[in-house]
Image: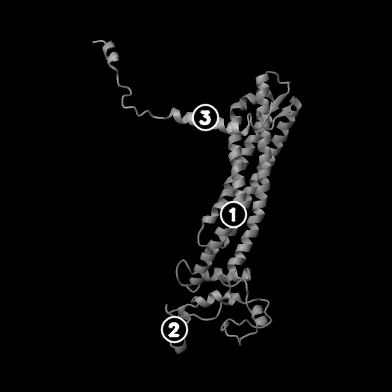
Amino acid sequence: MAVGKVTFSKVEREKLAEVLWLLNWISVVTGTILFGLGLFLRVEIHKWQEVMSEQGILYVPHMLITTGLAACCINFFGGKICLDCADTNKFLRWKLVMMPYIICTFFFTSCVLAGALMCYGIRSQMEESLFMGLRNAMRYYKDTDTPGRCNLKRTVDLLQIQFQCCGNTGYRDWFHIQWISSRYLDMSSSAVVDRMRSNVEGKYLMDGVPFSCCSTFSPWPCIQQHLSTSSTQDKQSQQLNLWRRGCRQALLDHYTGIMQSIGLTVLLIWLFELLVLTGVRYLQTAMENVLRLGDPESESDGWILENSLAETARSNFNIIKNLGKCYQVDDDPNINVPTAAAEEELPS
């Protein structure tokens, strides 16, 4: 029994072809939107890629960019096919192309859905990448004269100022690393030497933060050092003095908001493409049934699947299995060996 069987008259087939032609051109626009969203996401990730440990998350914008380009090409071609399918004679030219076109559109639609799901499922990977990347960026914050790391200080400072954050998970993260370069330390000072000797790794650690952690809403000058001393400030003034939120959470919230918005847009595009794919399938089956009937003016049936889902799956499985048998190699050692009777019939 056919799945989704619908009967179409000649006028309805023509209307369906015209509507699908219009929807395919709209799909070209949605493909351009997909391409633009992928490009926008690529640029946003590139802005702060120095504080990310890996670039594996770039597969999401690359997926959107590739899918957007494919959407423009496939739907541009599909608009021409649907417009010609309104006429039975013109449909004959596209009859053999329709099924491969529908299969390509199905896989393309699946890629759109995969892109939407990736936008919602990348949060954990993004969080881990930001945690490792920020930790390394803070560790190399002082290496302003080291090739490949000289811009990290500027990047971290811009990040903390723009997103109003401090440290990886909080401002106390700066207490556990040496963020002041040894070039700016007075090694003749006994206090500096004693502090470095007191650390196992010989690092100059202090309970202070860079200037970019200072809050712009503080009504008094920022206090950057001796932050762990309780007598320095009361609790309220301490909260106004520094940014309290960690930069990992700030960036994660920033990218999560972008991903959710893009994911919702891509999901709506997927529903639209699924509608176009369903309409093209109905048009194809209806026009093929018209050719079987031999009367262009008659009504014809269209469907999504000619048989039930279980029967279709079983039929495709048998086809694949038979294809495997065609390419199976016979391992019989006696193959192509002439028998005794055959040798006797050979002429001397």
Would you identify the image quadrant in which residue 271 lies?
top right
Q: Which colour scheme is used?
A: one colour
Badge 2: how crowded within 10 Å, few (<14), some, or many (20+)?
A: few
Q: On the image, numbered disc 2 is attached to which residue?
A: 198
Q: On the image, numbered disc 1 is attached to which residue?
A: 121
Mark 2 and mark 3: Cα distance apart in space: 75 Å
Furthest toward the bottom, the residue is: 190
Residue 239 in view here: yes
Question: Horizontally, is 348 left or right of 288 in the view?
Answer: left
Would you identify the image quadrant in which residue 183 lies?
bottom left
Residue 29 in view here: no
Q: Do the residues labelled 3 and 1 touch (CB within 8 Å)?
A: no
Question: Type of residue at label 2?
Answer: Ser
* Image coordinates for residue 107, horizontal then vertical, percent: 58, 40
Question: Type of residue at label 1?
Answer: Gly
Q: Which numbered disc flags the more N-terminal residue, 1 or 2?
A: 1
Residue 94 position (above or below residue 135): above
Q: On the image, numbered disc 3 is attached to which residue?
A: 319
Helix, strand or loop at label 2? It is: loop
**Residue under the image location 50 percent in, 76 percent down:** 176
Q: Which numbered disc flags the more N-terminal residue, 3 or 1?
A: 1
Indicate which label's residue lies in the foreground, 2 or 3.
3
Furthest toward the front, the residue is: 310
Would you identify the image quadrant in which residue 87 lies?
top right
Helix, strand or loop at label 1? It is: helix
**Residue under the image location 59 percent in, 35 percent down:** 103
